[in-house]
Amino acid sequence: MPRGRWGRKATFAAYKAKATMTMAELVEKYRASKSFIDRSAVVMSPKTLTSLDDRAPVIAQMMWDRCGVLPRHLIFVEVTHVKTPYVEDNRYRVTIFHRAPDGGGIMGVDLRFGFMEEPDVEKWLEDLARHQQIDLPPQHRRWIVHVAHENLLPARKMDLWRQLRFRLFLFLRLVSQPTSFYYGLGNNVQLTAEIFPVRVG
């Protein structure tokens, strides 16, 4: 298996192993909240969220554990790359987990791009907000985008071959473009990176 693919697979497996609340539990916390962070938060998700049984991304758990309060508008975005040059139909899918009567709520957005397309996430989120498909203000300067950055650590017991493979993957990550840059994030909106430890075996 190529080193990059092995590293991404191992990172994703470790990421999935992190204990987080379900989307149903997140919605319950939102409904029970008396106050909110009065801003719109876009959270990049490593997987598509379509069910209340899905596990919330690690960033959402970290936000709750740290602050005990949620943004009034919380949008989870996952980018899917398909095996066609261009996406002509079904560019996006919006899942509404909760929409508050007085404004705000929790939504999931799956954006699809072909392998010949530039995955400009900011542009498409602006378009969805402008057409009121999602609860975001059209002015992107009022958003804040949260991305995850893993602090990769070797497993406590790792043989020499795995250590070498792990170090090579760290080097490849160091010289490659960050995913947020590839997706056009941070060009016009405020971007924050949540760093958390991930042990890779």
Image: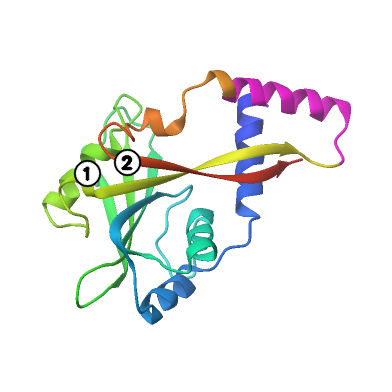
Instruction: Name the element at disc 2.
Output: strand
Quadrant of res 104: bottom left
**Mark 2 vs 1: CB contact within 8 A:** yes
Which quadrant, please, contains the N terminus? top right
The circle drawn on residue 15 is: none
Q: How far apart are marks 2 and 1 (CA)?
A: 7 Å
Question: Which range of residues does the magenta coloring cover?
Answer: 157-173
- Local crowd size for mark 1, using a 10 Å CA cut-off: few (<14), some (14–19), many (≥20): few
Is residue 66 shown left or right of residue 43? Answer: right
What residue did someone put label 2 on? 190
In this figure, which residue is indicated by the disc labeled 1? 141
Q: Which of 119 and 174 is in front in this view?
A: 174
Q: Which residue is drawn at 47% across and 28% down?
A: 178
User: In the depicted view, which residue is nearer to us: 125 or 72?
Assistant: 72
Near-viewer residue (141 or 16): 141
* Mark earlier in primary sequence (2, 1): 1
Residue type at mark 2?
Gln
- Relative side of 113 to 173, left or right: left
Instruction: Identify the amino acid type marked 1.
Output: Arg
Q: Please check the rendered image and state whether residue 167 is part of the magenta-colored stretch, yes or no.
A: yes
| Vertical comparison of 74 with 150: above or below | below
